[in-house]
């Protein structure tokens, strides 16, 4: 997947999709991809994260932190 290979636009777009763009909402997945895109310099992802965070429940936050940790472990 190109998002795993560092294509920032793909990472950002996966975040958009995960917030319900034609698929079931997955806030933890959106958070993962926007954190990764933000880390690689995508300013739009940073803005989206600020909007998303207040909508997330405790379960989503815990899951997203696990996903981010796992992703960095596999791709660094």
Image (cartoon, rainbow, N blue to C red):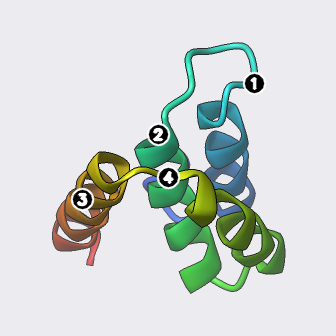
Tell me how many marks there are: 4
Work out how far the residue at label 1 is from the one at label 3, CA to CA, in angstroms: 23 Å
Marking on residue 52: none
Task: Please tell me how crowded label 2 is: few (under 14), some (14-19), or many (20+) other residues with Cα within 10 Å.
Answer: few
Name the foreground residue: 36 vs 48: 48
First-in-chain label (3 vs 4): 4
Q: Nearer the viewer, mark 2 or mark 1?
A: 1
Q: Which residue is mark 1?
A: 21
Query: How far apart are labels 2 and 1 at the CA level?
Result: 19 Å
Label disc, if present, on residue 1 of the rendered structure:
2
Nearest the eye: 41 or 32: 32
Q: Are marks 2 and 1 in contact (CB under 8 Å)?
A: no
Residue displayed at 41% across by 47% down: 28
**Viewer-side residue, 62 vs 75:** 62
Among the 4 quarters of the image, the one containing residue 8 = bottom right
CA gap, disc 4 and disc 2: 26 Å
Residue located beneath label 4 in the image: 56
Identify the element where label 2 is drawn: loop
Percent position of residue 30, x then y: 55, 48
Side (left or right) of 53 relative to 46 = left
Q: Residue 72: image x %, image y %?
A: 27, 72
Of the two numbered discs 1 and 3 in the rendering, the one whose residue sits closer to the viewer? 3
Which is nearer the N-term, disc 2 or disc 1? Answer: 2
Q: Which residue is mark 3?
A: 62
- Left or right, 61 with respect to 55, comes to left
């Amino acid at each position: 997947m190109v998002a795993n290979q560092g294509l920032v636009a793909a990472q950002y777009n996966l975040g958009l999709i995960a917030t319900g763009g034609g698929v079931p909402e997955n806030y933890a997945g959106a958070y993962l991809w926007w954190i990764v895109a933000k880390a690689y310099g995508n300013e739009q992802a940073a803005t989206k994260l600020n909007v998303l965070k207040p909508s997330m429940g405790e379960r989503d936050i815990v899951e997203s932190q696990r996903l981010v940790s796992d992703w960095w472990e596999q791709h660094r």
